[in-house]
Image (tube, helix red, strand yellow):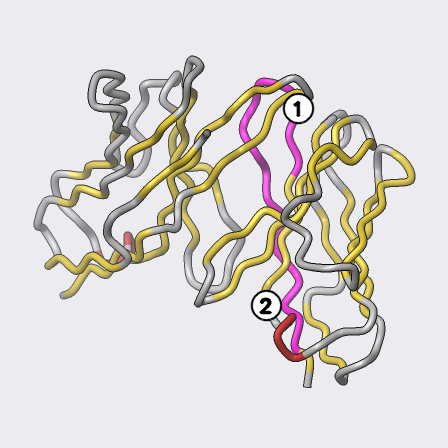
């Protein structure tokens, strides 16, 4: 098992551009979580899905952020338009019901 | 409401000294607690879960429901233990499961 796969590993973009982060969960995991990590705020839950359905998106900062899970093997987190304060490491994690979370390697986003 | 607290943002100890990373939680249901570790610029990795009652890399943690705590301990710290440590709680609601993370404690083991 390759684990949770995120792409890209690094993304550098200019303010105002659209950014799309991608995640492939571990096969068979029915939960998928998106987290954002910064020095100031630590690890923040943005949104999570159960069986491809968004359950709690109260952590999504504002309307510029959106997340989708069109099928069990793929999810995206989109920021449009991006701003410098969005610079962070974005982690995707998945788990089956009743088991621990497995994290991806993260996407380091820099918005200039 | 579900909540996990880790009172220390930074903990520095000397190599060979004992380490205790504190974690407290609040949850009305039956708790399931985890410790995750993040080495520099890497992903978070599961270190311990309380139901396993095992020791990983010399670390142990015991769930104390009376004190609502799940402190992480190691008798003799090593320099390679320097990392960020997150305590997490699995909570269940009408929609399924969620994971609540504490703010993390950065452990620095000095030579």
Gap in Å between the C-alphas at discs 1 and 2? 27 Å
**Secondary structure state at the residue bearing disc 2:** strand
Q: Residues within 10 Å of mark 1 (few under 14, many from 20)?
A: some
Q: Nearer the viewer, mark 1 or mark 2?
A: 2
- Which residue position is annotated with label 2? A88
Q: Quadrant of residue A99?
A: top right
Question: Residue A23 — which label?
Answer: none
Left of B94 or right of it: where is A49? right
x, y percentage for residue A88? 59, 67
Left of A81 or right of it: where is B83? left
**Residue drawn where x is 45% and y is 67% of the image:** A39
Please tell me whether residue B76 belongs to the stretch shown in magenta: no
Relative height, residue B109 to residue B88 (above, below)? below
Please tell me whether residue A102 belongs to the stretch shown in magenta: yes
- Which residue position is annotated with label 1? A96
x, y percentage for residue A45? 59, 47
Range of residues picked out in magenta: A94-110
Q: Are marks 1 and 2 in contact (CB under 8 Å)?
A: no
**Secondary structure state at the residue bearing disc 1:** loop
Left of A90 or right of it: where is B87? left
Left of A83 or right of it: where is B50? left
Q: Chain of mark 1?
A: A
Q: Chain of mark 2?
A: A
x, y percentage for residue A16? 81, 80
x, y percentage for residue A40? 44, 67
């Amino acid at each position: 098992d390759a684990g949770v796969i995120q792409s890209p590993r690094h993304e550098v973009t200019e303010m105002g551009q659209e950014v799309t982060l991608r995640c492939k969960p571990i096969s068979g995991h029915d939960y998928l979580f998106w987290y954002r990590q910064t020095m100031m705020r630590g690890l923040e839950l943005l949104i999570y899905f159960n069986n491809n359905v968004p359950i709690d998106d109260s952590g999504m900062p504002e309307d510029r952020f959106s997340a989708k899970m069109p099928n069990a093997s793929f999810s995206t987190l989109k920021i449009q338009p991006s701003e410098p304060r969005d610079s962070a490491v974005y982690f995707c994690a998945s788990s089956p019901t009743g088991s621990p979370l497995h994290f991806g390697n993260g996407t380091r986003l820099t918005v200039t | 409401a579900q909540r996990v607290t880790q009172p220390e943002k930074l903990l520095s100890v000397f190599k060979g000294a004992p380490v205790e990373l504190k974690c407290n939680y609040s949850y009305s249901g039956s708790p399931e607690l985890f410790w995750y570790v993040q080495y520099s610029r890497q992903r978070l990795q599961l270190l311990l879960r309380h139901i396993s009652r095992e020791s990983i890399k010399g670390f142990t943690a015991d769930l104390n429901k009376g004190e609502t705590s799940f402190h992480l301990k190691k008798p003799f710290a090593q320099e390679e233990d320097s990392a960020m440590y997150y305590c997490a709680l699995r909570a269940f609601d009408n929609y399924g499961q969620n994971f609540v993370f504490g703010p993390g404690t950065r452990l620095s083991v000095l030579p």
